[in-house]
């Protein structure tokens, strides 16, 4: 592990850590697209819209897992860099069992407050049956979704990014196999989609726990190790919450967008659901590179190796921004063809094409935001991480949505994310200067 983080050439170390994460993201991307494809092949617009409306729930669960996954990885990476391996081991166990507790509480809340949550999601009479099908399953089995984020992130900190990738691939492949069986053989509609999601996450969890026990002596999932210095618990929470808020704000942005699209009908909501999934082609790769590099950044910060840290950040920026520009161009050129792969309804293809272009044009700016986000999280700069998390798809997005909708109507809804991305990057650059002064 020391060679990888301390002496290996930056480019080689970067790709050794980041590429498995990117490949994991790509497999997850394929799963998301195939999942959308199978649901779309039912040609049931209400089913497509119903599953799309439930997307914020899935994102929320990932966000809760990120509190302990990304927050824990930030703390553990710095502990590894500072040679505090035993404390890092205890922090990993704390993350694992705290996540289980939070997931059980989440399931209870979802069951008790079902109707208000369904209303908040924007459920209509036509989509309610499908939303309920998905909701009932995910509210009970969500523990496996939340828990999957912990070993995935912590294993990468220990230099086992390839094993984390295998766990992700395993779960995605199982999901891809189960989706068509539940949809077209057993005709289980949204219930089948949700069951496939829960079971695949369970398999991923089981594999990654096995990896920790067999290959990662510097990590632990033992209950007896689930205690550590209070300052490290505070540290993982202070960094984990901003990381979590990034995903929670994503859920907020999707829900807000769907609410604004409601007057335009279920076709508009279905179109946006597909466009958002396709846009993940770029987003998930960018996230893979950005967060794949986070253990390396955190280790350099913990070891106080400023020279290597600067090299890592420069190379990270070069890779991410270059890729973002190329993929934005590709998506903008081939948008109608991509949309028609999912739905034959020409209204949805037309609406979705415009939506996808509006979503993709600001991707290079998102790349910059991701680089700054991982820097803030790795450095333990909770203030910067919190501001960025609340901005891009939160406060800034909300304000921009209101203003642009008032000025441009329907097109304002579609352009809100693009403008919000640009403003957030500017805020992030100002925060970097402030961090240097501190």
Image (tube, helix red, strand yellow):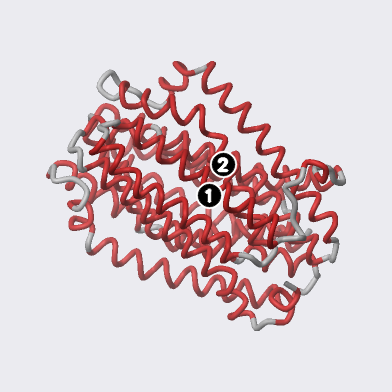
| 278 relative position to 17: left or right | left
Residue 75, position as x, y percentages in the image: 75, 54
Considering depth in this image, is 31 or 118 the residue closer to the camera? 31
Give the number of the disc on residue 63.
Answer: 2
Classed neighbour count for the residue bearing mark 2: other residues with Cα under 10 Å, few (<14), some (14–19), many (≥20): many
**Residue beneath the point at 58% across and 47% down:** 206
Give the number of the disc on residue 189.
Answer: none
> Is residue 63 shown above or below 113?
below
**Residue beneath the point at 43% across and 54% down:** 28
Give the number of the disc on residue 204.
Answer: 1
Residue 104 in which image quadrant: top right
| 124 relative position to 86: left or right | left
Residue 100 in which image quadrant: top right
Considering depth in this image, is 378 or 383 the residue closer to the camera? 378
**Residue beneath the point at 47% across and 38% down:** 198
Q: Where's the C terminus, which quadrant? A: bottom right
Considering depth in this image, is 181 or 94 the residue closer to the camera? 181
Can residue 399 be seen in this snapshot? no
Q: Considering the numbered disc 1 on the image, is that residue within a helix, a strand or a loop?
A: helix
């Amino acid at each position: 592990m020391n060679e990888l983080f301390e002496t290996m050439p930056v480019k080689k170390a970067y790709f050794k850590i980041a590429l498995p994460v990117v490949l994991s993201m790509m497999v997850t991307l394929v799963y998301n697209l195939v999942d959308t494809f199978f649901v779309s092949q039912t040609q049931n617009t209400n089913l497509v819209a119903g599953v799309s409306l439930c997307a914020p729930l899935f994102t929320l669960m990932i966000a809760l897992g990120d509190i302990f996954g990304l927050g824990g990885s930030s703390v553990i990476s710095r502990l590894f860099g500072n040679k505090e391996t035993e404390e890092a081991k205890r922090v990993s166990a704390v993350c694992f069992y705290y996540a289980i507790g939070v997931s059980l509480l989440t399931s209870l809340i979802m069951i008790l407050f079902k109707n208000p949550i369904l209303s908040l999601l924007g459920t209509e009479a036509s989509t309610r049956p499908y939303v309920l099908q998905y909701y009932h399953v995910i509210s009970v089995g969500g523990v496996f979704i939340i828990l999957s984020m912990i070993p995935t992130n912590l294993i990468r900190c220990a230099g086992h990014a390839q094993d984390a990738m295998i766990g992700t691939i395993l779960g995605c492949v199982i999901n891809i196999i189960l989706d068509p069986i539940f949809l077209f053989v057993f005709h289980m509609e949204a219930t089948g989609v949700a069951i496939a999601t829960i079971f695949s996450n369970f398999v991923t969890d089981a594999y990654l726990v096995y990896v920790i026990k067999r290959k990662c002596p510097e990590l632990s999932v033992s209950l007896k190790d689930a205690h550590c210095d209070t300052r490290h618990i505070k540290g993982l929470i202070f960094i984990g919450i901003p990381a979590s808020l990034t995903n929670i704000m994503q859920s907020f942005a999707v829900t807000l967008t769907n609410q604004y699209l409601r007057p335009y009908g279920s076709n508009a909501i279905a179109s946006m659901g597909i466009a958002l999934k396709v846009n993940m082609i770029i987003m998930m790769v960018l996230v893979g590179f950005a967060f794949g590099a986070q253990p390396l950044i955190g280790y350099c910060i913990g070891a106080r190796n400023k020279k290597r840290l600067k090299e890592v950040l420069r190379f990270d920026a070069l890779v991410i921004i270059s890729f973002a520009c190329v993929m934005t161009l590709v998506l903008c050129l081939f948008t109608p063809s991509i949309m028609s792969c999912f739905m034959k309804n020409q209204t949805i293809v037309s609406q979705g094409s415009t939506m996808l272009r509006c979503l993709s044009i600001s991707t290079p700016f998102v790349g910059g935001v991701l680089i700054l986000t991982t820097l803030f999280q790795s450095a333990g700069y909770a203030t910067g991480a919190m501001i960025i998390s609340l901005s891009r798809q939160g406060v800034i997005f909300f304000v921009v949505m209101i203003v642009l909708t008032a000025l441009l109507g329907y097109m304002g809804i579609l352009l809100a994310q693009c403008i919000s991305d640009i403003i957030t990057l500017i805020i992030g650059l100002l925060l970097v200067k402030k961090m240097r002064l501190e």
